[in-house]
Amino acid sequence: MAVLPLRKRPETVIRERITAVLAEVGPLLRIEHCLIEIVEFSGATGRLTVQIDGSCPDCSVSPVTFMPAIEAHIKQRVPEVLVVSVIAQ
């Protein structure tokens, strides 16, 4: 009897895609020093909550300043994400 591989839940697949996009964002915006993590994602509502931690060591710019660009990039690459909210540390 063959063992069928377990199928990942669609929400898990979406979270993996979001994680991959967040990994690209730091170098893209030259904010590698900031840590951006998924706090919560709801597939039912399309709401993504991320936590951003860190600050620019060379300037006074807050990481939250970059959130409109990060949000646009996430929404472009993962269309299931409809709303992005941020928790800043």
Image (cartoon, rainbow, N blue to C red):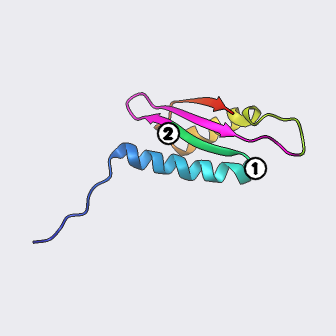
Residue 43 placement (x, y as % from top left): 40, 35
- Residue at point 64% right, 53% down? 24
Q: Along the horizontal axis of the image, is 21 left or right of 11?
A: right
Q: Quadrant of the N terminus?
A: bottom left
Residue pushed farthest left? 1
* Kind of residue indicated by mark 2: Pro
- Residue at point 42% right, 27% down? 45
Give the mark toward the camera: 2 or 1.
1
| Crowding near the residue tagged with mark 2, few <14, some 14–19, many ≥20 C-alpha atoms within 10 Å | few
Q: Along the horizontal axis of the image, is 6 left or right of 14?
A: left
* Callout 1: SS: loop
The reply to whether dot 2 and dot 1 touch (C-beta < 8 Å) is: no
Residue 59 placement (x, y as % from top left): 89, 40
As rendered, which of 4 and 79 lies closer to the eye?
A: 4
Residue 30 to residue 50: above or below:
below
* Callout 2: SS: loop
Q: Which residue is mark 2?
A: 79
Give the magenta-colored segment's residue range: 40-57
Residue 14 to residue 7: above or below:
above
Residue 13 placement (x, y as % from top left): 41, 49
**Mark nearer the N terminus (2 vs 1):** 1
- Residue at point 51% right, 33% down? 48
Residue 37 magenta: no
Q: Along the horizontal axis of the image, is 5 left or right of 24?
A: left
Residue 42 placement (x, y as % from top left): 42, 33
* Kind of residue indicated by mark 1: His
Q: Quadrant of the C terminus?
A: top right
Q: Along the horizontal axis of the image, is 20 left or right of 67?
A: left
Quadrant housing residue 6: bottom left
Q: Which residue is mark 1?
A: 33
